[in-house]
Amino acid sequence: MTVAPHTGEMIRAAFAPHGLFLRGTVNFSSDETAPVLSSGERAASVALIGNVGSSIWPAFRSWQEGRNDRGGADPLDAWSKAVIGPLAVELGATAWFPSDLPWQPFQQWAMRSEGLRASPLGILIHPRYGLWHGYRGALGFARPLEGAELLAPDHPPSCHPCDRCPDKPCLTRCPVVAVAASGFDVPACRGHLRTQAGQASCMLSGCLARNACPVGVEHRYVEDQLRFHMAALGL
Ligand code: B12
Ligand code: SF4
Ligand code: SF4
């Protein structure tokens, strides 16, 4: 049994005012270990909710300005919960958030539902938005969602930009070689971010490796958002 066919439209309409998009959906088969809903049942499906480019930034900053505590220690997570939590209740869904433990496999869900693959940086690359997109939450439903028609309207054809990028500039721009085909060296990156050089480059205008990618440059995060994410990474 599927949910009402208009659920995709309802999800889109509910999140659009916040700059959030329905990124894709996954239906679990009965032999998979799906996440557990607040009702105690296993989820039959999840809908991924996220940003493309800086789509969430005006809504997030305006929410933050209206709060005495500026959203607390993790304001973007707090905003995501403030927006997605109540809408999940309205839609009869359980909400999960990417930074909450136990980590739900957001990237696996995105690969499956959006046909995306990992870039050498570890983050998934989108044929249109490049490295400039992310996930703010997921909605779990007790029933399967219908498939293709629930994808974002601009869902791209399945192709992996890194396969068509012979020079791979993302692998050569990091001053401390923290980004390598073998993995992301978190201590090396954070060590550099604490130096004067790191403060004057990556912390100010974003990860040099991520900025070097030629895909979706028009969707690069605005400076304020870049600095916000770098501050979180450099902690
Ligand atoms: C832990 C974590 C980190 C750790 C990574 C530690 C490590 N070496 O693994 C740290 C803090 C360093 C990190 C950094 C960043 N992260 Co991070 N991170 C996560 C988190 C919370 C959990 C990942 C995980 O282990 N999941 C557990 C398993 C169960 O999930 P999975 O889907 O099955 O597993 C995938 C990941 O493990 C991934 N993976 C493996 N190695 C690495 C290494 C890195 C650097 C990343 C990002 C992913 C990754 O590959 C697996 C296959 O799908 C996810 C959110 C989430 N719930 O997934 C975000 C997440 C993966 N991060 C994200 C982002 C954007 C970043 C940063 C760019 C943020 C920033 N402030 O700049 C940086 C990346 C730095 C870079 N190289 O550019 C996004 C990626 C979105 C996308 N487009 O794919 C996510 C999904 C969060 C979100 N809100 O959207 N991250
Ligand atoms: S620079 Fe090339 S290899 Fe690196 S993430 Fe971008 S498209 Fe992929
Ligand atoms: S933020 Fe700077 S130090 Fe860290 S991976 Fe990117 S380029 Fe390297």
Image (tube, helix red, strand yellow):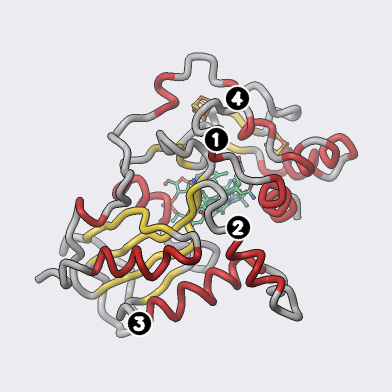
- Mark 4 CB within 8 Å of ligand 2: yes
Label at residue 90: 3
Please report whichever mark, 3 or 2, sits nearer to the chain's N-terminal start: 2
The x and y percentages for residue 33 are 27, 64
Q: What residue sits right under mark 1 in the picture?
A: 218
The secondary element bearing badge 2 is classed as: helix
Q: Residue furthest right?
A: 196
- Contact (Cβ within 8 Å) of mark 3 with mark 2: no
Of 100 and 22, the residue lying toward us: 22
Please report whichever mark, 2 or 1, sits nearer to the chain's N-terminal start: 2
Please report whichever mark, 2 or 4, sits nearer to the chain's N-terminal start: 2
Q: What residue sits right under mark 2 in the picture?
A: 57
Quadrant assignment, res 28: bottom left
Side (left or right) of 35 relative to 162: left
The secondary element bearing badge 4 is classed as: helix
Q: CA distance from mark 3 to mark 2?
A: 24 Å
Q: Amino acid at mark 1?
A: Glu
Please report whichever mark, 3 or 4, sits nearer to the chain's N-terminal start: 3
Side (left or right) of 32 relative to 100: left
Q: CA distance from mark 4 to mark 1?
A: 21 Å
Q: Residue at x 74, y 53 (%)?
A: 231
Q: Residue at x 50, y 51 (%)?
A: 134
Label 4 neighbour load within 10 Å: few <14, some 14-19, many 20+? some
Q: CA distance from mark 3 to mark 1?
A: 34 Å
Q: Is residue 20 above or below residue 131?
A: below
The secondary element bearing badge 3 is classed as: helix
Q: What residue sits right under mark 4 in the picture?
A: 171
Quadrant assignment, res 212: top right
Q: Residue furthest bottom?
A: 39
